[in-house]
Amino acid sequence: MEYRYMGKTGLQLSVLSFGSWVTFHKQIEDNTADELMGMAYDAGINFFDNAEVYALGKSEEMMGRVLKQKNWERSSYVVSSKVFFGWRGKNNKPNQHGLSRKHIVEACHEALQRLQVDYLDLYFCHRPDKNVPIEEVVFTMNTLIQQGKILYWGTSEWSGVEIMQAHAVAEKYRLIGPAMEQPQYNLFERQKMENEYVQIFKNQGLGTTIWSPLAAGLLTGKYNNGIPEGSRLGLEGFGWLKDRWMAEEKIQKVRVLGELANDLEVGIAPLSIAWCVKNPHVTTAILGATSKEQLTSNLQALEVLPKLTPEVMEKIDTIMQTKPSLPDF
Ligand SMILES: NC(=O)c1ccc[n+]([C@@H]2O[C@H](COP(=O)([O-])OP(=O)(O)OC[C@H]3O[C@@H](n4cnc5c(N)ncnc54)[C@H](OP(=O)(O)O)[C@@H]3O)[C@@H](O)[C@H]2O)c1
């Protein structure tokens, strides 16, 4: 396993990590979660990602039970939660979601209980909250750090401007600013990582914990001929995700990418993940998996990395046609 420093912090994360969105509680039970987290940990993965909203709190509870059962040294792994959406779904009342001081603090306490840990290593604002002054967010996160309840705070799917506003407040009041962002980054979605955040990487430093490196599974080729039973895009309640990804133009690109993977004698899933972590601004790509076979395949990404020569990278860009164009001179 390779480990990378998270932005300008002293924290090292394994370049591949493991998350629980959709899978924990909805698709897999404790025994499989235990098996997959065990496999991940044994392979050197040291970061496990979660959020209050995943399976409306049940995902954190499941991960908490597994962590307790595993009894790994607390210092050997990093665990996260995210605040914003709340865990009551449609029953959220005012103050049970968003980024007010009240919800950030209460959500932190609840995540600690569900995960059965004394502190969260990483705590993310899952989305920006347009109704809350950024000062309130930064002061609250700084306080949680001073209290030892969280170690690092960050953002997820914030714009570059929003991240910089948080830095400006932190600088003004001598508080601890956001250390990491959790953006989507895969062969279809490159804008934030390769364009919007470029100046922040350079001037501020920013760790990134990438979500959906496989575009929810599309980049495995499994949807090339329709939706296999039991897979994410066919699950009840995920029609919005199906609408996002099941487009003929996208699937056709995946088919051609599959041909390149064949030529390289690698799997398309590990190829897509390797492409993601080849970007040095990626601290870690969070893997999702519902079976041992999937995780085994995805962990091969590190062996594929050396095959990503400049020529191969160019071929990938030509196939995908998703590389952001930056102003030229
Ligand atoms: N911050 C955010 O807003 C945000 C949003 C989304 C996710 N996340 C985080 O990022 C993590 C990863 O995201 P993700 O789960 O969307 O990642 P992903 O890698 O894009 O998709 C993972 C899913 O693809 C399928 N899959 C994975 N490997 C496969 C393989 N080798 N062969 C066939 N199918 C395979 C599995 O679903 P099926 O078996 O059901 O097909 C698996 O659950 C999440 O767990 C969560 O921690 C964060």
Image: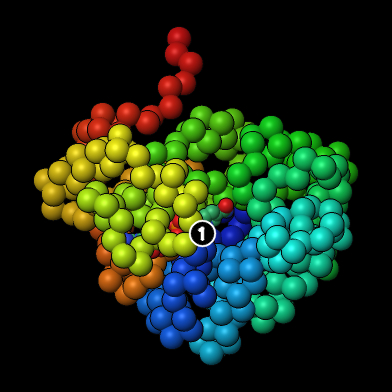
SS label for mark 1: loop
The one nearer the camera, 186 or 275, is 186
Give the farthest residue toward the top: 329
* Quadrant where the C terminus is found in the figure: top left
Q: Residue at x 40, y 73 (%)?
A: 40
- Image height of 179 relative to 96, above or below: above
The one nearer the camera, 124 or 329, is 124
Image quarter for residue 131? Answer: top right
The one nearer the camera, 43 or 317, is 317
Q: Is mark 1 within 8 Å of ligand 1?
A: no
Q: Residue at x 27, y 64 (%)?
A: 297
Whether residue 61 is visible to the viewer of this picture, yes or no, is: yes
Q: How many marks?
A: 1
- Relative to 227, is 19 on the left or the right? right
- Image height of 324 relative to 300, above or below: above
Image quarter for residue 320? Answer: top left
- Relative to 68, is 216 on the left or the right? left
Q: Residue at x 76, y 36 (%)?
A: 165
Q: Quadrant of ligand 1?
A: bottom left
- Image height of 157 relative to 68, above or below: above
User: Is the image coloured rainbow, by chain, by secondary structure, or in one colour?
Assistant: rainbow
Three-letter code for the amino acid on which mark 1 is drawn:
Gly
Q: Position of residue 200 (x, y in %)?
A: 61, 35
Q: Position of residue 182 (x, y in %)?
A: 57, 50
Q: Position of residue 304 (x, y in %)?
A: 25, 53
- Relative to 121, is 176 on the left or the right? right
Q: Residue at x 28, y 71 (%)?
A: 293
Q: Position of residue 33 (x, y in %)?
A: 45, 78
* Quadrant where the N terminus is found in the figure: bottom left
Image quarter for residue 159? Answer: top right
Whether residue 285 is visible to the viewer of this picture, yes or no, is: no
Which residue is identified by label 1? Answer: 237
